[in-house]
Image: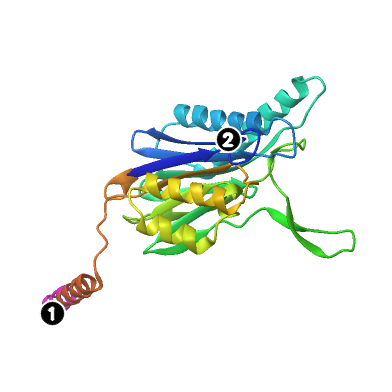
Amino acid sequence: MEKARISLQGDRPNNQDRCAIFDKEGSCLLVLADGLGGHPKGEVAAQIALNVCEQLFTRTPVPIATPRLFFHHCINRAHEYIIQYGQSQRPTIAPRTTIVMALLQDGHCHWSYAGDSRFYLLRDGQLYIQSTDHSVAQRDENGALTANRALTRCIGGLRSAPMPATEPPILLRPEDVLLLCSDGLWGQLPQQQLVDTLCNVFPLSKALQMLGNAAETNAANISDNVSAVGVRVGYGDCGVNAVIPSQEEENDLLTAIEHLNDLIEHNLHE
C-alpha cells in the first residue's frame, strides 16, 4: 500500500490541521482533523482528536468487529476531552475541530466524518465517492446567500457530542486511491485538478505535494492550512486479495459455469 501525507501552514499564523496513518496487524486507520480557526486552540482540539483515535485503535483488537461503534467511540471520547480541556483554561474556551476517518480492513473501507473535512475515493481515473459537507450557506444582511458556509457539526463547542456521518463500507479494488483532506485543499483547487493529479502522478507523495503547493498558490497569499492523507491500494493490502477479472475473463468464467451446470443437470436425469 502506497501511503502519503502533507500538512502545510499556508498563510495562517499557525497550522491547526492534524493528520496521520496508523497501521496495525493488517488493518489501517487514516485520520484527519481540522481545528476551527474562528475559535481558540483549534490545533489543540485537532491534536486531541488524533490522539484519541490512535489510542483507541491501538487498544482495539483488529479487524474491528463494529467499525461504526468504533468511530462513534472515537468522536465521543475526543469531544469529552476537548470540552474538559476548554473548561480547564482561564478564562474558559471552546476549541472545536472537524474530523474524517477511514478504516481499511478485510478488503473494505469503512469511513465516518463530522464537519467539512472530506473523504474521496477515486477509481478507474474518476471520482467514485465524495463525502457531503456538514455545512450550510450563510446569508448577508439582506438575506442573500453568500459564498461563506457555516458548519453544522464538529467536535467540541457544544455540550453534546455530534452524531457523525458513518457511511456503508466500500469493497476496495487494487489501484483505488483514498484521500482525506481539509477544506484548505479541496476549497482552493478545482476538483478536476485534484482527480487528475491523484490518478496520473506517481508516487502518491509527489501527487499530494503538487496539490498542496497548487492550493497555496491558488489562494493568492490568503491560503488556509492545507492538509491531506491518502493511500493507493495494492494487491494484498488490508485484505484486498482478489484480482479483478477483465470483461473477457469474466465472460469465459460465466460460460464455464453454465457448461458445468448443464453437465450436472444432464447427469441428474440419466
Q: Nearer the viewer, residue 185 or 103?
A: 185
Q: Nearer the viewer, residue 55 or 68?
A: 55
Q: Quadrant of residue 69?
A: top right
For this view, does 108 lie left or right of residue 112? left
Q: Quadrant of residue 63?
A: top left
Dot 2 corresponds to which residue?
Answer: 74
Percent coordinates x, y for residue 88 in the rendering: 75, 20
Q: Is residue 266 magenta?
A: yes
Dot 1 corresponds to which residue?
Answer: 266
Find numbered disc 1 in the image and state the secondary structure of the residue it sits on. helix
Find numbered disc 2 in the image and state the secondary structure of the residue it sits on. helix
**Residue drawn at x 72%, y 29% as measured from the top left:** 83
User: Could you tell me if residue 117 is visible in this image?
Assistant: no
**Callout 2: 10 Å neighbours few (<14), some, many (20+)?**
many
Q: Is residue 139 magenta?
A: no
**Callout 1: 10 Å neighbours few (<14), some, many (20+)?**
few
Q: Mark 1 to mark 2: distance in Å?
A: 57 Å
Callouts 1 and 2 close, C-beta under 8 Å:
no
* Figure check: 40 above or below 71: above
Q: What kind of residue is marked 2?
A: Cys
User: Could you tell me if residue 134 is visible in this image?
Assistant: yes
Q: What kind of residue is marked 1?
A: His
- The magenta segment: 260-267
* Figure check: 117 above or below 129: above
Q: Residue furthest front?
A: 221
